[in-house]
Amino acid sequence: MRRLAVIAVILLGAAVVAFVVVQQQRSTSTTDDTNSRANRRTNNTMPTNATANTNSNAANSREQMLAVARLFAERFGTVTSANPNAHLESVKSFAADALKATFERMKKNAAGAPAESTATTSQALSFSVRSFNQNQGRAEVAVSLQRREQNGTSTPYTYKQDLNLTLMMERGSWKVSVAAWGSAR
């Protein structure tokens, strides 16, 4: 029962973070739209403002990409044997269409529940952006996670593990197209 409460708290926390990110994206897009309308009204040939807006948009896009990477990694890395596919469902909104199809195949091929109850929680510690190209709508980032694994009543095992992500722009939003675990350390 205690494990379920911990998992519920983690999922609730992830939902709150997702809500904040969505609200931040809405305010960013509203601000960007207002800024571009103001620039068009006053003077279309304002090179310094155009450059500043381009840099600002790239910074916002990078922040949005990192927010998606963080939410995806923490949710994807939080797994429980009580509901072995919950983590796949919780990352669907952050996954590209091709990855969603892979998740559906994984769910169909999933084995039965293990005899012993297990739960793994994950928390993002840092990011390593390997590439970021807003114009091409492509990014690669490694999210370093601290993971805590609990098997039955045994002492929890804590370790670090990277989740290597490839992200792409899909219908105007950053989506994860590839997710690959690195070695545990």
Image: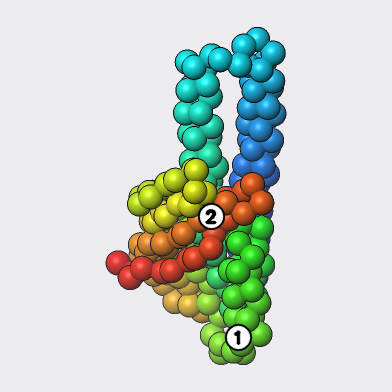
Q: Is residue 62 above or below residue 100?
A: above
Q: Is residue 61 above or below residue 145?
A: above
- The nearer-to-camera label among 1 and 2 is 2
Mark 1–mark 2 Cα distance, whole angstroms, equals: 27 Å
Report the residue at 60% width, 69% height from top: 98
Q: Is residue 16 above or below residue 111?
A: above
Report the residue at 47% width, 23% height from top: 51
- The percent position of residue 157, horizontal first and vertical second, equals 39, 69
- The percent position of residue 139, horizontal first and vertical second, equals 45, 52
**Between 52 and 95, which is closer to the camera in this rendering?**
52
Q: Is residue 59 visible?
A: yes
For the C terminus, give its image quadrant.
bottom left
Residue 105: image quadrant is bottom right
Label of residue 168 in the image: 2
> What residue is pinned by disc 1?
110
Callout count: 2
For the N terminus, give its image quadrant.
bottom right
Report the residue at 64% width, 37% height from top: 25
Label of residue 170 in the image: none
Q: Secondary structure at mark 1?
A: loop
**Between 123 and 43, which is closer to the camera in this rendering?**
43
Q: Residue furthest left?
A: 185
What type is the residue that disc 2 sits on?
A: Met
